[in-house]
């Protein structure tokens, strides 16, 4: 049988954050990591890849990471969603809860926090 590796999508408009997340995930888990910087780029990836885990920044240059959640769930109802945000105010945490987000990490976060959040789904 041919088993596909889980696919992890990282969406953040800060290149450093994307690169750090990509590196941590690629070194820690046997998966495919797709890194994108915008809602537009992420949408194209979601349409052409089955995403198992999505790590979404809230504030992006061309929109809000929360807006990708319906598209991700339409493509894969069991997708796990991790929101990362430097603006971890109550309103964002509440919105994440309303959208049934699986995990919310405030920036800055440690590599250990990121790994622990993801390993529960691997």
Image: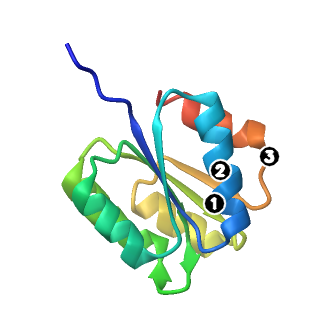
Residue 15, how many percent across, how many down?
67, 68
Point out the residue furthest to the bottom here: 62
| Residue where numbered disc 1 is placed | 18
Residue contact at pointers 3 and 1, CB within 8 angstroms:
no
Q: Earlier in the sequence, mark 2 or mark 3?
A: 2
Which type of secondary structure does the marked residue at label 2 adopt? helix
Which type of secondary structure does the marked residue at label 1 adopt? helix
Residue 67 seen:
yes
The chosen color scheme is: rainbow
Look at 59% across and 37% down and name the residue there. 26
The one of 26 and 83 positioned closer to us in this rendering: 26
Residue contact at pointers 2 and 1, CB within 8 angstroms:
yes
In this rendering, the label closer to the viewer, 2 or 3: 2
| Residue where numbered disc 2 is placed | 21
Q: Is residue 18 above or below residue 118?
A: below
Residue 92, how many percent across, how many down?
58, 71
Look at 55% across and 85% down and name the residue there. 61
Number of residues whose C-alpha sits closer than 10 Å to that of mark 1, classed few (under 14), some (14–19) or many (20 or more): some
Q: Earlier in the sequence, mark 3 or mark 1?
A: 1
| Residue where numbered disc 3 is placed | 110
Q: Quadrant of the N terminus?
A: top left
Q: Is residue 3 above or below residue 76?
A: above
């Amino acid at each position: 049988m041919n088993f596909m590796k889980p696919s992890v999508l990282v969406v953040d408009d800060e290149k450093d954050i994307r690169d750090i997340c990509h590196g941590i995930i690629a070194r820690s888990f046997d998966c495919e990591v797709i890194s994108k910087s915008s809602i537009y780029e992420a949408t194209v990836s979601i349409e052409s890849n089955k995403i198992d885990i999505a790590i979404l920044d809230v504030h992006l240059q061309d929109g809000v990471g929360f807006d990708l959640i319906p598209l991700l769930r339409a493509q894969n109802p069991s997708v796990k969603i991790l929101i990362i945000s430097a603006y971890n105010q109550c309103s964002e945490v509440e919105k994440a809860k309303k959208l049934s987000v699986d995990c919310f990490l405030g920036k800055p976060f440690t590599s250990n926090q990121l790994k622990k959040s993801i390993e529960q789904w691997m």
